[in-house]
Image (cartoon, helix red, strand yellow):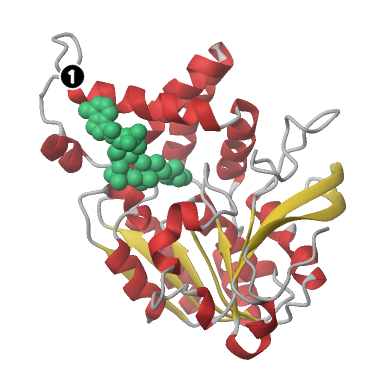
Amino acid sequence: VTTLSPGISTAADFRLGDFRTAGGALLRQAVLRYRVFGDPARGRERGWTLVFHALTGSHQVDQWWGPLLESGQPLDPSGGPVIAANLLGSCYGSTGPSQNDGPWPELTTEDLARAHIPLLEFLGIDRLALATGGSLGGMVALQWARVTPIPTDRVVVFAAPARTSAQSIAWNAAQRMAIEADPATGLAAARAIAMITYRSSLEFGQRFGRERNGQPDKFAVESYLRRQGDKLVARFDAASYLSLMRSMDLHDVGDLTEAGRETATRVGAIVGVGIDTDILYHRDEVHAWVDAYRAAGARTAYREIRTVFGHDAFLIEWDQVAEILRK
Ligand code: COA
């Protein structure tokens, strides 16, 4: 384990050790790679923020939420340290299926959340000002709110339902079929399928229309999807993709009244953020858990991002995301 010097932002490995999943499987000698932005010594006075990444993100929050970490922005580390860990199953330093001998267990979003508890205890974090994330990261944040033994003042969940719908499992199933046919070209096809669900018909129409990319046989939107597929193949592991997709399929906080009650005892307030053009995790699904949690006694609020970008808006609409976090 690398010890962090005050003020230094660096990645380090935490030996999580043997990790028992909710399903009873044992993941042996697991490691979590994490990164702290800012000075850990100021966490007690200023409050820590815990960030959970989405499907193909990582603990390198600056690579995907960079604008929010800038000076004066809501996650500016000088206002309080920010910590993120690479989720179990991913391929950016934490234990994933490609580093593991023996069968790889199913990990639920609750497992992914729970794996953070020993890490935060190791770092001496006894209170969080904020826990947040979007998409898969939002699902893990929602589970964090139910299970955290570490008091958390605010949880902000971007674009995530309380349980994954049949439609969302179906999108993942099509991606799985592509990867099963061939891990490399299949991962590219999976990314292309996913990108259709991450954006919107309106954006594709405005951005690409029926244009061709120089070559008469290729529509611009097709070249775009192929480019996104190739980029992911160059940086991501197909087995990790399958593991994290499975976690998304399994995502379910259980009975909403009970989950709302559990959340009310552990966090000060929880905010659900829907995206008006999100076809993957519809804003109505976010609204539904916010309402149920409120009825169960949790302090909650619903906020909405208005955008042409669809699900990906939590990675694009910086002003709206920052405004929600600031408030
Ligand atoms: N043909 C080929 N390539 C094209 C193109 C076309 N017609 N039009 C655009 N592109 C390429 C650009 O060259 C650029 O590629 P580069 O990154 O290699 O320079 C890229 O597409 C830019 O478009 P895009 O990626 O859509 O940028 P954005 O700013 O709109 O979106 C992200 C940024 C990070 C949101 C997006 O790239 C992304 O990765 N989305 C998926 C993230 C994700 O995993 N979300 C959900 C998690 S569960």
**Disc 1, SS:** loop
Q: Is residue 178 visible?
A: no
Is residue 79 toward the left or the right of residue 306 in the image? right
Residue found at x 58% / y 87%: 46
Where is 228 relative to 259, above or below?
above
Q: Nearer the viewer, residue 201 or 63?
A: 63
What amino acid type is highlighted by mark number 1? Phe
Residue 140: name its quadrant: bottom right
**Where does the N terminus fall, quadrant-wise?**
bottom right
Where is 281 relative to 212, above or below?
below
Q: Is residue 122 visible?
A: yes
Q: Position of residue 115 (x, y in %)?
A: 74, 57
Q: Position of residue 102 (x, y in %)?
A: 85, 28
**Where does the C terminus fall, quadrant-wise?**
bottom left
Report the residue marked by disc 1: 219
Disc 1 packing (10 Å; few <14; some 14–19; many ≥20): some
Q: Nearer the viewer, residue 66 or 252?
A: 66
Residue found at x 48% / y 78%: 295
Q: Nearer the viewer, residue 192 or 285?
A: 192
Where is 325 relative to 13, above or below?
below
Residue 183: name its quadrant: top right
